Image (cartoon, rainbow, N blue to C red):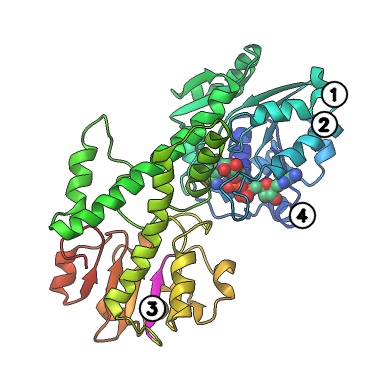
């Protein structure tokens, strides 16, 4: 596995756990040092234990020595990042191509090269070209990863489907064998062309992002028309053709995948002169969502928020992960601080380096010290430990308000406790 981030580390560890011999390589020395001490560099429930177990049983090893790792392996998974290029919707494939060149340099015998990273249509073709001078050694295939941070181990063990894209059919059997412990437990094994597989991943993420954006826009309509968005989600989602997941109104979608993959899909389609107008609208609507929710803080606290104490509960883009990439908090918090608010935040996954340099923004190590004296508590990420907070007891400010971006709390309960409460997509949200 080249790249030991969320995808490479989780899938590498899980491959070892189903009996394979796995080497995880990363260029980041500190990550590898931690891993060799059996400490996970990322927060993912259950991962520490699984790393330890497979490390001790010697099925899993960690190294920065890419030469040795490449030479001892039969199948090489490229799991490096594919971020959006700065200021562009295009995908930055430099990490993928850099490790392709390393694979080319160090390979001395036959290998299957698998892109597990999310890559645009045709990337496999480019990789093949880069390996052309030793082409007899390589079969380049696509096997996108669908795991979700926070539930990654379960998602690896019980995937809805395993997608393998190859232009050479003989590889399908090898990959089927690799995944056989999962297939035997009922996971669907789906084969297609290499480009088909590359596109399935983008199409899936763009569709899920569309569902979130759709329900977020409907939440705006519900607020104005006195309807409860949760009834709409339930009423719509009960239709098996639609399905209830990804239909919960909340903040803008974020994380390491949806924002960059929606843009990456539009950019790839542009190359083929295809206008993906639906996905373009989704990207725009999602950007508007961040602004709309930030402006709502003004509606709640008034236009002058100088010296107002605002406490965030959760800053990651979703619970059970430490991932901050494209979280709504990264736009809201700097804006509010710039307007003079004093922002505290607490997140169960710890302090965030991304927020460290922001003036007037401070990390607090528990819910109580975070919320003490707040004018406004903003619930941004629905971690379990936020589900039953006695706000009256901990905030200790007679006039505090709660802005719940995840509809985690009951309006009736808040009313009973005489707490000024705002949420999203419900009648009287604000
Ligand atoms: N994070 C997710 O939930 C998720 C889910 C599905 C798919 N994906 C896709 O998987 C890919 C990886 O995502 P991630 O979140 O794991 O990324 P990440 O940034 O967490 O990890 C990437 C790792 O690759 C390492 N790396 C980069 N270049 C290298 C090189 N030449 N040699 C060795 N190591 C190198 C980096 O040091 C880093 O540790 C992306 O394409 C992403 O879109 C991510």
User: In which quadrant of the rendered image does the N terminus lie?
Assistant: top right
Classify mark 3: helix, strand or loop.
Answer: strand
Residues in magenta, as a range: 308-314
Work out whether residue 227 or residue 48 is closer to the camera in this orientation and state it.
Answer: 227
Classify mark 1: helix, strand or loop.
Answer: helix
- Magenta segment, prevailing SS (helix, strand or loop): strand
- Nearer the observer, disc 1 or disc 2? 1
> Which numbered circle lies on residue 133?
1
> Which numbered circle lies on residue 23?
none
Measure the C-alpha gap from mark 4 to mark 3. Answer: 38 Å
Classify mark 4: helix, strand or loop.
Answer: helix
Q: Is residue 385 visible?
A: yes
- Does the magenta segment cover residue 264? no
Give the quadrant of residue 21. top right
Q: Position of residue 338 (x, y in %)?
A: 48, 79
> Which numbered circle lies on residue 104?
2
Classify mark 2: helix, strand or loop.
Answer: helix
Q: Is residue 186 left or right of residue 379?
A: right
Disc 4 marks which residue? 29
> What's the residue at 42%, 65% (across, down)?
314
Measure the C-alpha gap from mark 2 to mark 4. Answer: 22 Å
> What's the residue at 29%, 52% (across, down)?
217
**Contact (CB < 8 A) between labels 1 and 2?**
yes
């Amino acid at each position: 596995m080249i790249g030991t981030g969320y995808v490479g580390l989780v899938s590498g560890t899980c491959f070892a756990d189903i009996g394979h011999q796995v080497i995880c390589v990363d260029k980041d020395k500190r990550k590898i040092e931690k891993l060799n001490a059996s400490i996970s560099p990322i927060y993912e429930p259950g991962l520490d234990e699984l790393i330890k177990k497979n490390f001790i049983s010697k099925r899993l090893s960690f190294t920065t020595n890419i030469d040795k790792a490449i030479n001892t392996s039969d199948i090489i998974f490229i799991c490096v990042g594919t971020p959006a290029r700065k200021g562009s919707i295009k995908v930055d494939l430099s990490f993928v191509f850099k490790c392709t060149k390393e694979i080319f340099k160090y390979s001395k015998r036959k290998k299957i090269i698998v892109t597990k990273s999310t890559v645009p249509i045709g990337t496999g073709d480019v990789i093949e070209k880069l390996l052309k001078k030793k082409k007899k050694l390589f079969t380049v295939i696509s096997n996108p990863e669908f795991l979700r941070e926070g539930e990654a181990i379960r998602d690896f063990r019980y995937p809805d489907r395993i997608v393998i894209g190859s232009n050479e059919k003989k590889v399908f059997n090898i990959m089927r064998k690799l995944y056989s412990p999962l297939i035997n437990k009922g996971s669907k094994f789906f084969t297609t062309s290499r480009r088909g597989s590359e596109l399935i991943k983008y199409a899936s993420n763009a569709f899920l992002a569309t569902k979130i954006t759709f329900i977020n826009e409907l939440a705006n309509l519900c607020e104005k028309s006195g309807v409860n968005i949760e009834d709409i989600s339930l009423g719509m989602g009960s239709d098996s053709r639609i399905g209830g997941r990804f239909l919960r109104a909340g903040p803008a979608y974020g994380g390491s995948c949806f924002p960059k993959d929606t843009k990456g899909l539009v950019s790839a389609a542009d190359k083929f002169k295809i206008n993906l107008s639906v996905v373009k609208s989704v990207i725009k609507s999602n950007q508007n969502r961040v602004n709309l929710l930030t402006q709502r803080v003004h509606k709640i606290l008034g236009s002058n928020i100088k010296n107002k104490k605002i406490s965030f509960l959760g800053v990651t883009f979703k619970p059970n992960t430490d991932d901050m990439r494209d979280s709504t908090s990264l736009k809201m918090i700097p804006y509010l601080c710039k307007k003079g608010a004093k922002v505290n935040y607490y997140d169960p996954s710890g302090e965030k380096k991304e927020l460290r340099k922001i003036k007037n923004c401070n990390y607090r190590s528990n819910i109580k010290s975070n919320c003490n004296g707040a004018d406004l508590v903003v619930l941004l990420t629905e971690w379990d430990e936020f589900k039953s907070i006695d706000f009256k007891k901990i905030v200790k400010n007679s006039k505090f308000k709660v802005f719940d971006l995840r509809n985690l709390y009951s309006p009736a309960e808040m009313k009973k406790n005489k707490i000024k409460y705002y949420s999203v997509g419900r009648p009287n949200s604000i």
